[in-house]
């Protein structure tokens, strides 16, 4: 066997395969601030502050002018102690429905949005939250530079609150706005997305 000829042929094959392979594309996880962002939300019969956190998966880089998607938009909306007590006093102990915190972006134009699911959650005593998962959005990248993502405001969830002891479900659209503070909230996801 001619080793030199074999190695040359093998090297040529690798180069051909490398030339025909698609561009490498790793996925990146984008996360909201770990401290969570406060929002004011309308519950049945009252408005209360919650804190929210979210994450999603997106590309590690995109070309200018290209369409790209972010997927797996998921997170948790944590109730204040006061909100938990008020819900309990009204006889509510769980939730289900649909919706998510919308993601906004600088240097990108929004496209199609698919809302997430709020799975059925029955809360233990003196705890309360709303989990959501499975949302996605598409964008068209702008100029070379960076796309910076943020948690949107306002957002709304199409919910049903569970009422004990009879087990009925009450429809409710929970609308939320980021709480105005000084200094202002930082609802940005990190990292930023490079645009080439």
Image (tube, helix red, strand yellow):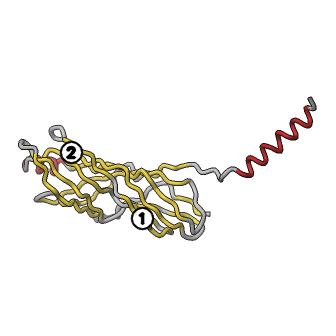
Q: Give the answer, above or below, for where 193 lies relative to 85.
A: below
Q: Residue 114 location, x and y as percent?
A: 37, 59
As rendered, which of 167 and 92 lies closer to the eye?
A: 167
Q: Nearer the viewer, residue 50 or 28?
A: 28
The residue at 38%/54% (across/down) is 135
Name, please, the residue furthest toward the top: 1
In the picture, the disc for residue 112 is: 1
The quarter of the image holding the C terminus is: bottom right
Which of discs 1 and 2 lies nearer the camera? The answer is 1
Above or below, comparing residue 148 to residue 74 in the picture? below
From mark 1 to mark 2, how far is it between C-alphas? 31 Å
Across the whole image, how many numbered discs are drawn on residues? Answer: 2
Query: Which residue position is annotated with label 2?
Result: 128
Q: Report x, y in % for residue 174.
A: 21, 59
Q: Quadrant of the N terminus?
A: top right
Camera sees residue 33: no
On the picture, is 62 further left or further right than 38? Answer: right
- Label 2 near label 1: C-beta < 8 Å? no
**Residue 175 in the figure: left or right of residue 63:** left
| Badge 1 or badge 2: first in the primary sequence | 1
Location of residue 139 in the rendering, given as x and y in whole percent from the top left corner: 48, 65
């Amino acid at each position: 066997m001619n080793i030199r000829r074999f190695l040359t042929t093998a090297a040529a094959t690798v180069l051909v395969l490398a030339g025909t392979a698609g561009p490498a594309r790793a996925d990146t996880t984008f996360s909201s601030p770990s401290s969570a962002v406060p929002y004011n939300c309308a519950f049945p019969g009252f408005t209360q502050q919650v804190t929210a956190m979210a994450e999603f998966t997106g590309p590690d880089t995109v070309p200018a002018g290209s369409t790209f998607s972010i997927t797996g938009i998921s997170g948790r909306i944590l109730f204040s102690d006061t909100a938990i007590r008020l819900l309990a006093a009204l006889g509510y102990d769980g939730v289900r429905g649909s919706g998510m915190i919308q993601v906004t972006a600088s240097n990108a134009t929004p496209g199609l949005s698919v809302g997430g699911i709020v799975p059925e959650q029955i809360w233990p005593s003196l705890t309360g939250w709303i989990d959501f998962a499975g949302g996605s959005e598409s964008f068209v990248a702008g100029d070379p530079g960076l796309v910076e993502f943020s948690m949107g405001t306002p957002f709304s969830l199409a919910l049903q609150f569970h009422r004990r002891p009879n087990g009925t479900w009450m429809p409710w659209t929970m609308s939320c706005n980021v709480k105005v503070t000084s200094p202002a909230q930082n609802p940005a996801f990190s990292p930023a997305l490079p645009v080439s």
